[in-house]
Amino acid sequence: MSSFQNNKKRFYVTIFTIILFLGSISIAIILDKPKKKENYPVRKPNSTSISNNGNSDKFTNDNTNTNSQNNQDSKKENSNTNKSSNSQSSSSKVTNNIKTSNSNQSKPSNTASNSNTNSNKPTNSNTTSNSNTNSNTSSNKPVEPPKNEDKNNSKRKSIEKAYGVKILYGNEIGSYKPKGITPTKLTNDNDIENYLNRLNTELAKYPKNFFQDFNKKGMPLTIYLIKSANGAFSGFTDYQFMNDIKLTLTTDFEFEYTFHHEIMHYIDCYLNIVMYPKTPYEEFEALNPKEFQYGKASSSQIYNMANNPRGAYFISKYGASNVAEDRAEIFKYMTARAYAPIGCFEKEEIIRKKAIIISKQIKTYFPSVTTDAHWDRFIK
């Protein structure tokens, strides 16, 4: 090979080497050039209220940059974002957000929604709405005094608890017709309050647990307070069913006397059971004149307070109608009166003896009566 050809070959090799060197430098410069940052559209934060089975927890999308749909499968942006927050924790948190535009998940936050939120400002978790309304603020309304209806119900319940009886009034009596008569109901709240107080006073005259003695024998008492029975009666004790004894009281005639009269009928129901096979009437009737029949008493045999006769057998004309009414009339005067009828128990020997028999029977057969009771005042 000639020297010319050798020089020519070296020349081409040198030129090729220089070209490769310059090319590598260009490539390095190109590769080393910083990549231009792409500007993606920034979504303003959305506040979404989500109901979870009736719970009102709120979730907020906070200042997040999302990628477009075209790059969702190929690009993930790793950003170290310092988020400032005015929540209960003041520390800054560095988060790695990898989010796609199709993501339906929302980041939970205690942030309250503000209708004027600026996307460039951090969210304050204690921010309230612009209405300046605090949902937890209660209005300072004056306390209304209890209505008479509520007071009456409370009073009624306290009486029932104290004595072991049940009390009904107004529409509570339903369709019950004492003695087959449709009563005029007691519905005025002031009247109800008045008669509940009066009833409480009269019940207090009986020994403690007196009415519990009836309950233990399965003979509970329900007291019906009515306005009137169209003049047919002032009181009525219905013992058709011994496990549901009803005592009806009208409020238009001698309330206190009537109550104790009817309680004596209730007592006799009890005595007829506990004294069986005897009755509470045998010893009592033995004090009447021989061959006497109730309903046929002469006026001289009936006590008259004005004339104050001696030798009376019955305290009233109604008491002379039958033995049960005879006992009930005597007991009502023993219990209801504030003072003794003139000469009734002091000078009328038969009436006094009848009163003593009633008192003795109650003391004997009622466990709650261990000493002299209220009705013993006039016969000591």
Image (tube, grey):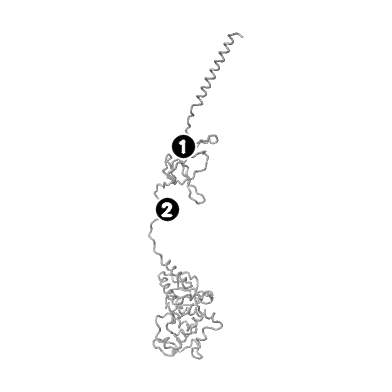
Quarter of the figure with residue 298: bottom left
How far, Cα to Cα, is label 2 from label 1?
Answer: 36 Å
Q: Quadrant of the C terminus?
A: bottom left
Q: Position of residue 63 (x, y in %)?
A: 46, 40
**Is residue 165 shown above or below 360?**
above
Q: Position of residue 175 (x, y in %)?
A: 50, 71
Q: Secondary structure at mark 2?
A: loop
Quarter of the figure with residue 11: top right
The disc, 2 or 1, on the residue closer to the chain's N-terminal end is: 1
Q: Position of residue 372 (x, y in %)?
A: 45, 81
Residue 367: image tag: none
| Of the pair 161 and 284, the residue shown nearer to us | 161
| Of the pair 95 and 39, the residue shown nearer to us | 95
**Amino acid type of disc 1?**
Val
Q: Which residue is mark 1?
A: 42
Quarter of the figure with residue 147: bottom left
Q: Are marks 2 and 1 in contact (CB under 8 Å)?
A: no
**Amino acid type of disc 2?**
Asn
Badge 2: residue crowd in 10 Å (few <14, some 14–19, many ≥20)? few
Q: Which residue is mark 2?
A: 136
Is 269 left, or right, of 198 in this rendering? Answer: right
Q: Secondary structure at mark 1?
A: loop
Would residue 60 be seen by someone viewing this image from the given angle?
yes
